[in-house]
Amino acid sequence: MSAPEDMTLPAKSSLPELDGAGLETLYREMLLIRRVEELAAKAYTQRKILGFCHLYIGQESVAVGAAASTKDDYWIAAYREHGHAMAKGVPANEMMAELFGRATGSSKGYGGSMHIFDKKHRFMGGWGIVGGHVPLANGVGWAIRQRKENRVCVCYFGDGAMHQGAFFEALCLAQLYKLPCVFICENNYYAMGTPLHRQSAVTELAERAKGVGMLSESFEGFDVEIVRERVARAADFARAGNGPVLLEIKTYRHRGHSMSDPAKYRPKGELEEKKLLDPLRISAARLTEDFGYTDAQMEAIREDIYTEAQAAWDFAESSPEADASKLYEYIYAPDGGQ
Ligand SMILES: Cc1ncc(C[n+]2csc(CCOP(=O)(O)OP(=O)(O)O)c2C)c(N)n1
Ligand SMILES: [Mg+2]
């Protein structure tokens, strides 16, 4: 059986129209993620942040746009998750402190860049094994159903993760059990240094959903307003009990795969071309051109956000180191995680 012909997403989401103030909020969120990560890059080169560090710069519109309709839902992401965590509500201070390995971090400083986790905000991590967390999203979806919660689980992964066995198996079961999950592939066209056309013969990644009878869509995600609306439609569909959806959102990372990758493998001019589609640039232009924001207003927003990001650095730097003596206390939840 293939996906029924009459299975489509709603033509319009349940979200209200976005006005200037609404877009400003999204713009501020994207700018804060951007600035925190720019500072993280600086801290990394000063060896204040150790281990792996994968920046989300260029992709902010995806997480921020998705959060507009799923802020109270569950999210689970891979290792490029600083932006997802912040879009979901993890405060910049706790985020930066986690990167610095401090006790005030969202994972008490024991997780670091790839393992941001925040139960209070229903942010279920931060996972390092490519594709490995996709089956976990099914588990969250199953729990939502068992607990009769009116929620969905949004699961983020990259184009590279879509070739993993775990991904296929999870997708198959999610559709079979009609789990309330929204699977979001952030197709940034690279898995480390391997471009998409060298990863798979099928480069229209949303097509993969057809193999399990799942509804899917593919679209460009540089404009936060488009992401906001289209993820909301998928979330509405899954929340109403119609089953999961796979969204392929085309995006681009401005930096290398991780801090140790100078990204020399890109064709000449590609980065410059994609930077014209920078989500911050698109939303700033809309604020000024369509909503009448003045240069002074835009500058004031920038100052606010830069101050907030710097405060996060200061908070992290002045926080105590993670307590090494308690490291093993947090491997398993003592109360079964309840
Ligand atoms: C199972 C597994 N294989 C290989 C790796 C090494 N690895 C880390 S990230 C990555 C690329 C994944 O690319 P993609 O899914 O497109 O995500 P992106 O980094 O572009 O966000 C690889 C191969 C890993 N972490 N896990
Ligand atoms: Mg990728």
Image (cartoon, rainbow, N blue to C red):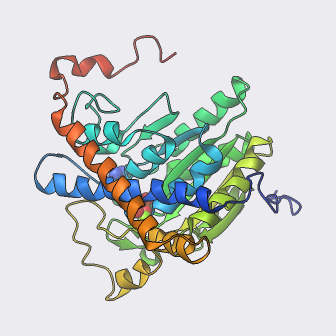
Toward which corner of the image does residue 143 lie, by quadrant? top right
Outermost residue on the right side: it is: 6
Q: Residue at x 45, y 68 (%)?
A: 280
User: Is residue 163 in sight in this rendering?
Assistant: no
Quadrant where ligand 2 appears:
bottom left
Outermost residue on the left side: it is: 46
Measured as percent of width and height from the top left, residue 122 is found at 53, 33
166 and 227: which is toward the camera: 227
79 and 282: which is toward the camera: 282
Measured as percent of width and height from the top left, residue 162 is found at 51, 59
Q: Residue at x 28, y 43 (%)?
A: 312
212 and 55: which is toward the camera: 55
Quadrant where the image shows the N terminus: bottom right
Q: Relative to 145, does residue 224 appear above or below in the rendering?
A: below
Q: Relative to 36, does residue 288 appear above or below in the rendering?
A: below
Left or right of residue 14, residue 310 in this image: left
Measured as percent of width and height from the top left, residue 246 is found at 65, 56
